Amino acid sequence: MTELAVPPPVVTTRWWRDAVIYQVYVRSFADGNGDGVGDLLGVRSRLGYLSDLGVDAIWLTPFYPSPMADFGYDVADYRDVDPIFGSLADARALIEDAHGLGLRIIVDVVPNHTSDRHPWFEAALRAAPGSPERARYIFREGKGVAGELPPNDWESIFGGPAWTRVGDGQWYLHLFAPEQPDLNWEHPEVHEEFADVLRFWLDLGVDGFRIDVAHGMVKAPGLPDVGAAGQAEMIGAQVVPFFDQDGVHEIHRAWRRILDSYEGERIGVAEAWAPSPERLANYVRPDELHQAFNFHFLKAPWDAVRFREVIDESVRTSALVGAPPTWVLSNHDVKRHVTRYGGGERGLRRARAAALLMLALPGSAYVYQGEELGLPEVLDLPERYLQDPQRLRDPDSGRDGCRVPLPWTDAGEPPYGFSPPGITESWLPVPAGWRDLSVEAQVRDGASMLSLYRAALALRRERPELGDGTLTWLDSPPGTLAFRRGDTFACVLNMTSGWVEIPHARAAEYGEPLLASSGPESSGGVVRLAPDSATWWTRDNV
């Protein structure tokens, strides 16, 4: 046995250390006003569903005024609500109603860049090179005889150059779409502005912030060419001169001080891509943010050895800074894991097993809307609906397929209750085959994915050994994982495509089955674990 310990916090365990947080992609969750686009009124109308599901908090994607070049991640005003999503009064009512149900609210903040329609950037375009207005962004002179070449060789994450030239010949940096100019975090006004934005929403009652591109605000000094960096370390397609510069941590320390000045354990969550778990752990040091998304876990292939390596490394590196691990399987930027795990029945079996694995691990977990329904990636959306700016620049990397609206009812035709009765068109079409995946259909089916999530989340709340704490690995056959939480709970995962037999004597060490994604079976002196399955076991009589 190998024990991986997460040191207990200095004070009583805090809510965020073992919370299950549900990501609401607002455009696709529920349409309250009948225009085919999800909104805050729709979210508010479905808070009871989220309470019944058993989650602790809700993370809302951006709902601020925006031209929607990147569906809200291009913010024009950080202190208001875009009319397509409702009003500031709707936001206040949503926060109040959620708190009444015991649900906390986390909102997105986008500090790496603004919209090109933000008043600051509009003023920068009107002003001359070298002006105070331009100093809030990253404007540079170009290279070449007449400045006709970009200032360096950086590429946008969405594809193409990371620089766009304006009429007077200067270039501005945008690590994402041209409509998303990067802010200059060396400018004191940028720091002051975002400190005020945080306080604005904290005063309204939000419980924390998910920080978009938390690794990106500070750029390498001198903006060096990637080629000139020689052995520059890669983060997927993202390069160190762009991201994960040490200077970002001073920003997060300042924000932590703001969060700590409010009552009620307000939190910061980093969307941070880092080249190693050790670098990622820097974002959750005691004086920085509270959580960081574990993309190493999300990207792990369906393989027992690789999963254990990722889990071990995540628990170990989080423990180094006294933080809980944070687990995530899907989000609005990646293909849904039902599809990533093979699609069809196999992908669904693996997704069910992965849910029980994630919810049994120490720390906190994030659930992306629709994964509790087992929704697959939609791969055949009609061309006329495809609007993702990332996909428009790189056809193979579009994110529309994981953002299709949720099906709520199994009556009538698509969009199956996403919009009020009589509305038949949603901003992305809901597949006709999703009738049986709807909330209404799955609530009636005790064997559905939704029923599995509800049962698992209820048990997670009831059992003190789950959530924050320690993990102890148990011996198990090749292709499987087994670990204990506390003295009475065990999780056993079969990641092979065949049945795996375990002698009764060993199974007795796990206890009695408590909840299973599929199987197990017991006969002839052995317990047989179903293919691609997870089982929770209990020894409550110990």
Image (cartoon, helix red, strand yellow):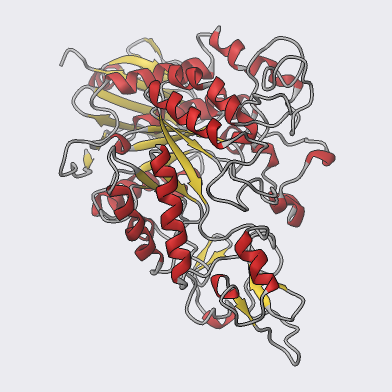
What is the quadrant of residue 146 in the picture?
Answer: bottom right
The quarter of the rendered structure image containing the N terminus is: top left
Against 288, residue 133 (above or below) is: below
The quarter of the rendered structure image containing the C terminus is: top left
Query: Which residue is located at x 63 percent, y 46 percent?
Result: 65
Query: Which residue is located at x 23 percent, y 49 percent?
Result: 322
Please identify the residue farthest to the top as the structure is shown: 444
Query: Which residue is located at x 58 percent, y 80 percent?
Result: 225
Residue 264 in percent (x, y) is at 29, 37
For this rendering, which residue is in front, 487 or 378?
Answer: 378
Q: On the rendered structure, is 430 left or right of 92?
A: right
Query: Which residue is located at x 38 percent, y 69 percent?
Result: 246
Please identify the residue farthest to the bottom as the structure is shown: 145
Against 459, residue 481 (above or below) is: below
Against 111, residue 29 (above or below) is: above
Q: On the rendered structure, is 196 left or right of 409?
A: left
Q: Is residue 293 visible?
A: no
Residue 403 in percent (x, y) is at 65, 36
Residue 487 in percent (x, y) is at 18, 25
Q: On the rendered structure, is 388 left or right of 200?
A: right
For this rendering, which residue is in front, 502 or 126?
Answer: 126
For this rendering, which residue is in front, 85 or 281?
Answer: 85
Residue 60 in percent (x, y) is at 52, 37
Against 206, residue 314 (above or below) is: below
